[in-house]
Image (cartoon, grey):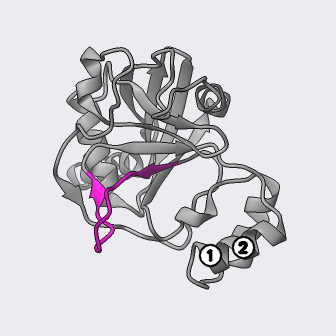
Amino acid sequence: MRLFVLLICFLLLVADAGARNRKVKIITTKGTIVVQLSDKTPKHRNNFIKLVKQRYYDGILFHRVIKEFMIQAGDDSTKQSIPGKRYGSGGLKNKIPAEFDTSLFHKRGVLAAARDNNPEKASSGSHFYLVQGKIHTDSSLNDIEEKRLGGRKLPLNHREVYKQIGGSPHLDQNYTVFGEVVKGIEVVDTIAQAERDQFDRPKEDIRIIKMKLKKKFLFF
């Protein structure tokens, strides 16, 4: 009986460790990015894991990139892309309820869910972006608070991060952040700086070759 209880405890520890340490490897034509998914946003985390397991993202383009802002993917119609075509309207049509957490904000390197304009701020079922962002000053942050956040004040610790490592603070509490880059931020920079057309699509196709889910288990 004691052995059985120990076995159950061990299995629970392993499962819990796996749930807390979700990492996804994003292999692109410009290099590899590794993201850590947040347990503070379980709906977004689970949806992303499901799509990775289904190989939904394998072969799609980063169809929208903007230097000092972000790189976006999630439109599965880009797997058979046409040169010069504007993409972004494709992808899954289901929505994920917003999961805002004040500790998750748009600093450089975060993973977040794109969305259309809807009052619930619900996320797209497949579109995501990685933030490159830029370094801010107190003056630029004050301007964002007044003009983009409706007077809402950014927490002081967030302001310091935006001034030191950068980000895109105008998106805070408007788009769900559900992870961050833990390796390969230089790949995000490379993709964000790609030459692009009038639709912000890179002139040279940049693809996600494959995504792989990595689980870090306790004692393994």
Indicate the amino acid at tag 1: Lys
Q: Position of residue 137 (x, y in %)?
A: 83, 64
Where, quadrant-wise, is the N terminus in this rendering? Answer: bottom left
Q: CA distance from mark 2 to mark 1?
A: 6 Å
For disc 1, the neighbor class at 10 Å (few under 14, some 14 to 19, many from 20) is few
In the rendered view, would you say 134 is above or below 185? below
Indicate the amino acid at tag 2: Asp
Instruction: Tell me: 95 left or right of 64.
Output: left
Q: Position of residue 27 (x, y in %)?
A: 46, 20
Residue at 23% from the left image edge and 38% from the top image edge: 91
In the rendered view, would you say 31 is above or below 42? above
Instruction: Tell me: 56 left or right of 219.
Output: left
Q: Which residue is mark 1?
A: 147
Figure quadrant of residue 213:
top left
Q: Give the dominant element type of the magenta stretch: helix, strand or loop.
A: loop
Q: Position of residue 186 (x, y in %)?
A: 68, 29
Where, quadrant-wise, is the C terminus in this rendering? Answer: top left
On residue 208, which mark appears?
A: none
Whether residue 65 is visible, yes or no, is yes
In the rendered view, would you say 151 is above or below 139? below
Residue at 60% from the left image edge and 23% from the top image edge: 195
Figure quadrant of residue 217:
top left
Q: Nearer the viewer, residue 150 or 182?
A: 150
Magenta region: 111-124
Q: Position of residue 68 (x, y in %)?
A: 67, 43
Q: Is residue 117 highlighted in magenta?
A: yes
On residue 143, which mark appears?
A: 2
Per the image, label 1 sits on a secondary structure element best described as helix
